[in-house]
Structure formats: C-alpha cells, structure tokens
Image: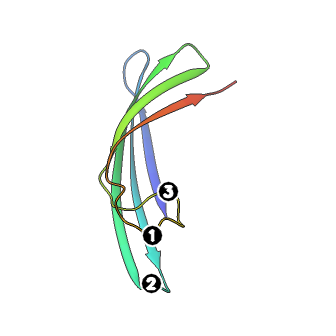
C-alpha cells in the first residue's frame, strides 16, 4: 500500500511525501517506509526531482534484497 501527498510550494517547486507498507504472506514479513522528494518545474512539460527513500524495500516487488534506502533522482516529462 502507498499513500502520498504533493504540496505545490512557491512558483515552480513541489514537495512530495509518501508512506509505504509492504506485507508479504509467504515470506511472513511486514515493512514500512517513508519517501520524501522535492521537484522543480521547467516549463509546462518537464520536472526534475531529488529525494530520499527512508525505507528498505524497492518499488520493484521482485527485488527481495532490502537495500534500497538512499538518495534518488527522478525526471518527469508530460504532454
């Protein structure tokens, strides 16, 4: 499960936060994590972000090695 909010700060800047929970039945594990990021808009069609994943698990649910904590960058293009 994932729940998130995005706040449009000033001018071209956004702040986003997500709370994530992963429960696996077969492996009998339960993990939670928080992800935060800041984005800068460039025009109407592009934004660049940098953030930090405070959790140990990945968006890729087949990745069972829980070593995904750390910094990330994200590029978003839209039309």
Judged from this view, the residue extending furthest toward the right is 79
Horizontally, is 13 left or right of 77 in the view? left
Q: Is residue 7 above or below residue 45?
A: below
Label 1: which residue?
64
Q: Quick one: label 2, few (<14), some, or many (20+) residues within 10 Å?
A: few
Mark earlier in primary sequence (1, 3): 3
Callout 1–callout 2 Cβ contact below 8 Å: yes
Quadrant, the C terminus:
top right
The x, y position of residue 16, in whole percent, is 40, 39
User: Between residues 36 and 65, which one lies in front from this camera angle?
Assistant: 65
What's the residue at 32%, 58% (across, down)?
55
Q: Is residue 42 above or below residue 63?
A: above
Label 2: which residue?
27
- Determine the secondary structure under disc 3: loop
What's the residue at 35%, 65% (across, down)?
32
Q: Is residue 3 above or below residue 75?
A: below
- Determine the secondary structure under disc 2: loop
- Determine the secondary structure under disc 1: loop
Q: Quick one: label 3, few (<14), some, or many (20+) residues within 10 Å?
A: few
What's the residue at 56%, 30% (across, down)?
76
What's the residue at 48%, 19% (across, down)?
41
Label 3: which residue?
59
Q: Nearer the viewer, mark 1 or mark 2?
A: 1
The x, y position of residue 2, in whole percent, is 47, 58
Q: Quick one: label 1, few (<14), some, or many (20+) residues within 10 Å?
A: few
User: Disc 3 versus disc 2: distance between alpha carbons?
Assistant: 17 Å
Mark earlier in primary sequence (1, 2): 2
The x, y position of residue 50, in whole percent, is 38, 33
User: Disc 1 versus disc 3: distance between alpha carbons?
Assistant: 11 Å
């Amino acid at each position: 499960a994932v729940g998130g909010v995005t706040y449009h700060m000033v001018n071209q800047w956004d702040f986003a936060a997500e709370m994530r929970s992963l429960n696996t039945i077969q492996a009998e594990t339960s993990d939670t994590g928080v992800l935060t990021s800041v984005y800068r808009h460039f025009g109407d069609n592009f934004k660049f972000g940098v953030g930090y994943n405070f959790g140990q698990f990945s968006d890729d649910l087949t990745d069972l090695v829980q070593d995904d904590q750390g910094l990330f960058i994200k590029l978003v293009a839209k039309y």
